[in-house]
């Protein structure tokens, strides 16, 4: 047995890790415990010749196929995992009156907009075998609200180079989790954790977010920052040059942004997304050793003038970068050193990662090595936005420690951006993923209004610009537009709200962020509540939206607001609005649809 307290990933909180090595020396069982966390993280570590095989989950006898002949359940052959080599955990349970929920998460958001499905299964003794794939499940007692969370820190099933036929089985009175994901090269399998919770959905969200904060603690000033990126206006790299970016920095400062990110096109090398034909989308180093140097025509003085102007305006500069995925990301160290060079030369600590192609376990390990090398060398100051919009990528839970998930590309040019749809995606994802880990966009709604037509009541141009920014405030905001193209009045409106938000965001993001109300659909009362993560303070922050709902007043119930009365501090003035909160309920009045309430709730003592 070996014990250590070093972090498994560079960003993690201190923990106790224990490695148990059987006598054969071919494999080890690893356990990790974070202080105050109601669960144990486990994984398997093997030598190159002792990899686990793909599981063979099947039923013994004929119990999996109904024969039509009624038999005494005691005499019916039970189902089992016939090949236990890939088992992670196996628990005997008393499943009476429980529900098992499989959370199906979708990435590749260039082709998906329904990102979250919750499949609820009610346990019944007639169910002899249930096989499920996924990274996240929870089992809850319907009568008490107590439950267990089953989380695998792995890519989604479709993106895993080695994927078991199922990740979880329910067999009568037992739950088994499977799928180490180890190939013939051995190494560490995927980490898996079972977390206990109580108090129903609120307790589950609180525990799951707290666990994610153990893997990547929230750091004010590093996380949850407001970033702008010009790509959302569809100029691609056609507008990029020194003069343009200097203007972008000045406009972003008016908006109250923290970082101006230069997307694809700042570099000498040409990608397949360029307005210039003939670019590449992989093997970037093969295209030239100078691929990742500043473009000599667009930025003849390098990036130094851009960085100097940004610093003078109190902003950081971020860059777009694409890992070379060729040959299983064999150049990962070269990529990592290149990103660190950006930091040394220009102070770049915000990097959007794109074009990742993950087709083997070796490639997956090399991509992880890239991230961890940069994090360790930068003392966790570099923040990565890892894009999940396309291809085979680590995704929501494959790399929960590196920075925000860049969730989606939406464009008014293509008429696929609706504010309520983005809000819906955030609201649904926030039930399972720490919202600070989600990079959520808002666009310049004044562009392409004609593409939506005059009869669409949910067209982006129908919204107050402040409402569009508010959608992103409890996550990590992304201004997906050219700042210089925003009308002056729009820029001022967003900047006014952003200035208020900046004064409170550390407290908002430090809390547990709960989706409240109905799932957004364009006609709902919905929103978020940030409450103290440890439950030691009754104070809270509210962000409530009245979509195109007929009712001016809505009561949110079942909230963790336990004080008898609350004082309300309106942070964003709204004409005709009021809020009252007490004893787990909150009544919000907004006189007009497409309004929102942003407020701090302070318990009366």
Image (cartoon, helix red, strand yellow):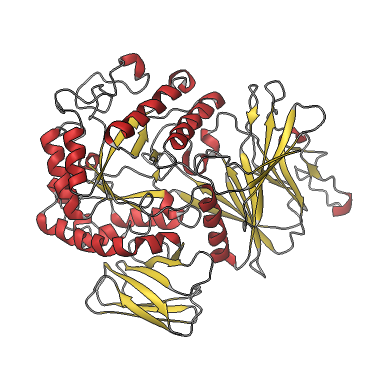
Q: Going by the picture, which residue comes out furthest to the right?
A: 75
Residue drawn at the location 73% of the way across and 30% of the way down: 27
Residue 206 versus residue 535: which sits nearer the camera?
Answer: 535
Residue 455's image quarter?
bottom left
Residue 334 versus residue 436: which sits nearer the camera?
Answer: 334
Residue 340 in view (yes/no):
yes
Residue 72 in view (yes/no):
no
In this rendering, position of residue 441 left or right of residue 531: left
Residue 30 lies, in percent from the top left, at 69, 39
Residue 546 versus residue 205: which sits nearer the camera?
Answer: 205
Residue drawn at the location 28% of the way across and 46% of the way down: 416
Residue 61 lies, in percent from the top left, at 83, 39
Count of marks placed on residues: 0
Quadrant containing the N terminus in the rendered view? top right
Residue 490 lies, in percent from the top left, at 15, 57
Compared to residue 497, the image places residue 254 above or below, namely: above
Residue 109's image quarter?
top left
Residue 481 versus residue 122: which sits nearer the camera?
Answer: 481
Residue 541 lies, in percent from the top left, at 39, 69
Residue 97's image quarter?
bottom right
């Amino acid at each position: 047995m070996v014990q250590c307290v070093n972090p498994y990933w560079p960003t993690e909180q201190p923990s106790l890790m224990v490695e148990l090595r059987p006598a054969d020396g071919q494999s080890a069982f690893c356990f990790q415990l974070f202080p105050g966390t109601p669960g144990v993280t486990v994984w398997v570590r093997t030598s190159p010749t002792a990899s686990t095989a793909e599981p063979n989950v099947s039923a013994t006898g004929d119990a999996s196929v109904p024969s039509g002949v009624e038999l005494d359940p005691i005499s019916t052959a039970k189902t089992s995992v016939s090949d236990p080599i890939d088992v992670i955990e196996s628990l005997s349970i008393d499943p009476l009156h429980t529900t098992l929920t499989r959370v199906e998460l979708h990435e590749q958001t260039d082709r998906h907009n329904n990102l979250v499905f919750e499949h609820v299964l009610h346990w019944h003794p007639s169910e002899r075998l249930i096989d499920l794939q996924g990274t996240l499940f929870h089992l809850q007692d319907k009568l008490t609200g107590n439950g267990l969370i089953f989380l695998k820190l792995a890519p989604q099933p479709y993106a895993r180079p080695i994927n078991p036929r199922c990740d979880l089985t329910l067999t009568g009175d037992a739950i088994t989790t499977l799928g180490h994901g180890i190939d013939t090269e051995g190494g560490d399998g995927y980490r898996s954790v079972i977390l206990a919770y109580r108090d129903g959905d609120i307790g589950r969200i609180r525990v799951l977010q707290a666990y994610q904060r153990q893997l990547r603690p929230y750091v004010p000033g590093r996380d949850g920052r407001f970033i702008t990126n010009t790509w959302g206006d569809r100029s691609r790299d056609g507008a990029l040059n020194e003069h343009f970016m200097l203007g972008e920095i000045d406009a972003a400062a008016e908006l109250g942004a923290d970082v101006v990110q230069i997307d694809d096109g700042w570099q000498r090398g040409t990608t397949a997304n360029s307005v210039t034909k003939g670019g590449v989308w992989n093997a970037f180093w093969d295209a030239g050793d100078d691929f990742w140097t500043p473009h000599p025509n667009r930025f003849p003085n390098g990036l130094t003038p851009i960085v100097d102007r940004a610093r003078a305006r109190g902003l950081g500069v971020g860059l777009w970068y694409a890992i070379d995925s060729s040959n299983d990301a064999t150049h990962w160290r070269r990529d990592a050193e290149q990103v660190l060079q950006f930091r040394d030369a220009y102070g770049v600590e915000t990097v959007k990662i794109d074009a990742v192609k993950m087709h083997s376990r070796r490639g997956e390990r090399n991509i992880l090595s890239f991230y961890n090398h940069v994090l360790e060398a930068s003392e966790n100051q570099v923040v990565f936005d890892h894009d999940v919009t396309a291809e085979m990528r680590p995704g929501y839970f494959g790399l929960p420690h590196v920075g925000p998930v860049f969730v989606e590309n939406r464009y008014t040019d293509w008429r696929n951006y609706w504010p309520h749809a983005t809000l819906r995606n955030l609201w649904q994802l926030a039930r399972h993923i720490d919202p600070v880990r989600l990079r959520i966009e808002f666009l310049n709604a004044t562009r392409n209004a004609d593409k939506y037509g005059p009869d669409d009541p949910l067209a982006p141009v129908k919204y107050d610009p402040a409402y569009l920014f508010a959608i992103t405030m409890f996550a990590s905001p992304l201004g997906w537009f050219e700042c210089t193209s925003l009308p002056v009045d729009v820029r001022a409106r967003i900047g006014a709200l952003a200035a208020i938000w900046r004064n409170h965001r550390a407290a908002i993001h430090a809390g547990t962020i709960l989706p409240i109300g109905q799932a957004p659909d364009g006609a709902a009362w919905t929103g978020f509540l940030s409450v103290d993560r440890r439950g030691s303070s009754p104070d809270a922050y509210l962000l409530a939206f009245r979509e195109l709902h007929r009712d001016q007043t809505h009561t949110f119930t079942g909230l963790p607001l336990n004080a008898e009365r609350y004082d309300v501090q309106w942070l964003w003035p709204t004409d005709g609005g009021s809020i009252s909160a007490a004893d787990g309920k909150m009544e919000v009045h907004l006189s007009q649809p497409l309004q929102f309430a942003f407020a701090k709730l302070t318990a009366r003592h």
